Image (tube, helix red, strand yellow):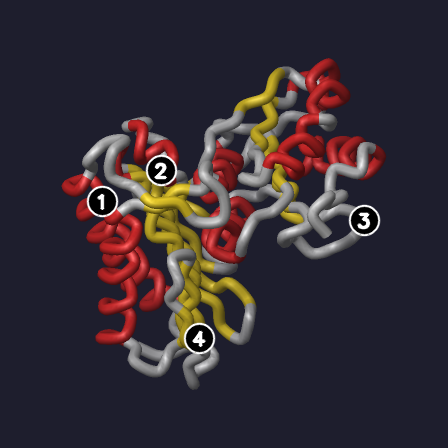
C-alpha cells in the first residue's frame, strides 16, 4: 500500500470502520456506563476508548509511519504525509441512549487534503465511502445529493455545541431560519449529517464548532456526492462553520447564515 493509492487507503478505512462499529455494537451498556469530557453533557464511553484503540492498532499495524488524529486522544504526526483522522463513535450521546444515529468515521488525508473516507453507521449496517475524484457510495450504490433549488423546500440539519453559552448563541439563529426553510433536523452526529446530505436525506447541513474528525470523512463524502461544502464568507469549512448543501440552495443558505452571524463564537 502506498500513499498514492487512495483506493487501498479506503479499503483499510472501510475494514477498520466496520470492525470498530461492530465492537461498539457489542459493548452497548446503556446510560450508566460513561464519563464526561469538556462539560457534563460531553460524554465518552468505554466503547469510545475501545473503538479508538482498535482503530489505532489497525492503522499502526498496516501503515506504521502514518499520522493519526483521534477524538479520544490519539495523536501522532507520522512521517509519510498520510494522516488518519478518526472518530471512534460520532454521536456518543445517541449511542448512550440507544438511538441508532451514531457512526465510526475515518478520514484519510494526504498532505492535509482528504483523499478517502469511510463512515459506518453500524446499527443500520450502512457504510458511506468516498475517494477524491471517484464519487461517493452507500453500500456500493452511488450517492447523489438533492436537486432542490428553493430555500423554502430545503430540509436543513444542524447541531449544537456542548457549552451552554455557545448553545444559547446558536439557538438565536433558529427563529430566523425556521420560517424560511422546509424544516430543521438535529440528528446529533456531524459525520452522519454530512453523509445525509450526500444521500439526499438532508438538503443542507450547517454547524459551528466541528472538529477535524467530524469533517474529514463526511465532508469528502458530501463533496463527492455533488454537494457544496464550505465555510462562511469564502472561508474554508472548519471550526467556525461547516455548511454542506445541494448546489441549488448553497448560496441562499450561506447568505442567510452570514447575515445572522451564525459563525460568531461567544467562547472566543
Q: Nearer the viewer, mark 4 or mark 2?
A: 2
Residue position marked by numbered label 2 in the rendering: 102
Is the C-beta separation of discs 4 and 3 under 8 Å? no
Q: Residues within 10 Å of mark 1 (few under 14, many from 20)?
A: many
Residue position marked by numbered label 4 in the rendering: 82
- In the picture, measured across the screen, residue 117 lies left or right of residue 169, that is left
Q: Residues within 10 Å of mark 3 (few under 14, many from 20)?
A: few
Up/down of 221 relative to 65, above or below: above
Is the C-beta separation of discs 2 and 1 under 8 Å? yes
Residue 174: x, y in percent? 69, 23
Residue position marked by numbered label 1 in the rendering: 24
Sequence-wise, the earlier of marks 4 and 2 is 4
Residue 65: x, y in percent? 35, 82
Please tell me whether mark 3 sits on a helix, a strand or a loop. Answer: loop
Residue position marked by numbered label 3 in the rendering: 233
Q: State the residue at coordinates (47%, 29%).
A: 187
Amino acid at each position: 500500500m502506498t500513499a498514492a493509492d487512495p483506493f487501498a487507503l479506503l479499503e483499510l478505512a472501510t475494514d477498520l470502520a466496520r470492525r470498530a462499529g461492530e465492537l461498539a455494537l457489542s459493548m452497548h451498556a446503556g446510560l450508566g456506563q460513561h464519563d464526561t469530557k469538556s462539560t457534563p453533557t460531553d460524554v465518552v464511553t468505554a466503547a469510545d476508548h475501545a473503538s479508538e484503540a482498535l482503530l489505532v492498532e489497525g492503522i499502526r499495524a498496516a501503515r506504521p509511519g502514518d499520522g493519526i488524529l483521534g477524538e479520544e486522544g490519539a495523536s501522532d504526526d507520522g512521517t509519510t504525509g498520510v494522516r488518519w483522522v478518526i472518530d471512534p463513535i460520532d454521536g456518543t450521546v445517541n449511542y448512550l441512549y440507544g438511538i441508532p444515529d451514531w457512526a465510526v468515521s475515518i478520514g484519510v488525508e494526504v498532505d492535509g487534503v482528504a483523499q478517502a473516507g469511510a463512515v459506518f453507521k453500524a446499527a443500520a449496517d450502512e457504510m458511506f465511502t468516498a475517494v477524491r475524484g471517484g464519487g461517493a457510495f452507500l453500500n456500493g450504490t452511488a450517492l447523489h445529493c438533492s436537486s432542490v433549488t428553493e430555500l423554502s423546500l430545503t430540509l436543513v440539519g444542524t447541531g449544537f455545541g456542548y457549552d451552554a453559552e455557545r448553545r444559547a448563541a446558536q439557538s438565536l439563529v433558529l427563529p430566523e431560519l425556521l420560517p424560511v426553510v422546509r424544516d430543521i433536523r438535529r440528528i446529533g452526529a456531524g459525520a452522519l449529517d454530512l453523509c445525509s446530505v450526500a444521500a439526499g436525506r438532508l438538503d443542507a447541513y450547517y454547524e459551528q464548532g466541528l472538529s477535524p474528525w467530524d469533517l474529514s470523512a463526511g465532508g469528502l463524502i458530501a463533496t463527492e456526492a455533488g454537494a457544496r461544502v464550505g465555510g462562511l464568507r469564502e472561508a474554508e469549512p472548519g471550526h467556525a462553520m461547516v455548511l454542506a448543501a445541494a448546489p441549488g440552495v448553497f448560496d441562499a443558505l450561506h447568505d442567510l447564515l452570514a447575515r445572522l452571524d451564525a459563525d460568531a463564537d461567544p467562547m472566543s
